[in-house]
Image (cartoon, rainbow, N blue to C red):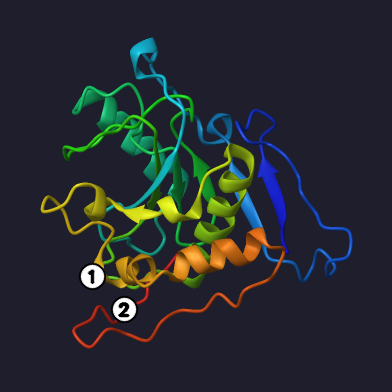
Amino acid sequence: MWKWIVIGASSAIASVAIASNTPSPATQPSLVIVSRDDWGSKPQTMPTTRRHVPKLITIHHAGVVWKAGTDPAQNVRNLQKFSQNEKKWPDVPYHFMIAPDGRVFEGRDLNYEPDSNTKYPLNGVLNIELMGNFEEQRVSLEQLRATTLLITKLCRELILDPATIRGHGDAAQGQTVCPGKDFKRYIDDGTIRAWVEAELRGESPAIEEKPELKDGPTTRIAE
């Protein structure tokens, strides 16, 4: 079982869930959520035509190689500026973004559908992005844990089915390799889904990194 540490009272899913008969907080895996206010989000007004009810979970990678020492909060602010100025989107295209250290940054309001560079139905889609390029880097253990705990929380609160977990390339077939081969295999073989389902049953699955792929990547993403 696990606990939530939420930074910022304005968090859209701000809550704390701590099981009564779990290990001490020092040994519990925890998930840190950085609210929009805390990272300095400045979203533009979303048109009412973009409102939706989340039903599907789609996982992405940023597709940009992560450089050690990069500030995740600044990375998110840069993405928001790019999205608004270059793409003409009102906000970041993702509802949540996960840094290499496992921190989860709140993005677009869950009540509004995402945006995408690819073409597939977006109504009902909940977008989660992992920072990094998993064609060239290995996903961090912290990101795997955060992804599992975040999706578990969302499945509980929004009544989502873990069977809807998919990669961006599954939704937009033939258009992208996102979320990258090192991470995609965790979706393709059902690993992420199994971890989430175990959490939903109140278990504590052993979240572990898979061995390196024969054709790489070999370098683990660094904070």
Q: Which residue is mark 1?
A: 136
Q: Horizontally, is 24 left or right of 204 in the view? A: right
Q: Quadrant of residue 61?
A: bottom left
Point 62% across, 33% down: residue: 11
Disc 2 residue crowd, few under 14, some 14–19, many 20+, Cα 10 Å? few
Q: Horizontally, is 185 left or right of 156 in the view? A: left
Q: Is residue 63 visible?
A: no
Point 58% across, 36% down: residue: 35
Disc 1 residue crowd, few under 14, some 14–19, many 20+, Cα 10 Å? many
Q: Residue 215, which numbered label?
A: none
Q: Amino acid at mark 1?
A: Glu
Q: Which residue is mark 2?
A: 219
Point 37% across, 65% down: residue: 187
Q: Determine whether 50 is above or below 165 in the image.
A: above
State which tag comes first along the sequence, 2 or 1.
1
Q: Horizontally, is 38 left or right of 212 in the view? A: right
Q: Is residue 6 visible?
A: yes
Q: Determine whether 4 is above or below 74 in the image.
A: below
| Furthest-right residue in this view | 20
Residue 103: where, in percent of width, then height? Answer: 54, 53
Q: Horizontally, is 178 left or right of 17 in the view? A: left
What is the CA distance from the residue labelled 2 to the residue labelled 1? 8 Å
Which residue occupies the foreground of this view, 218 or 126?
Answer: 126
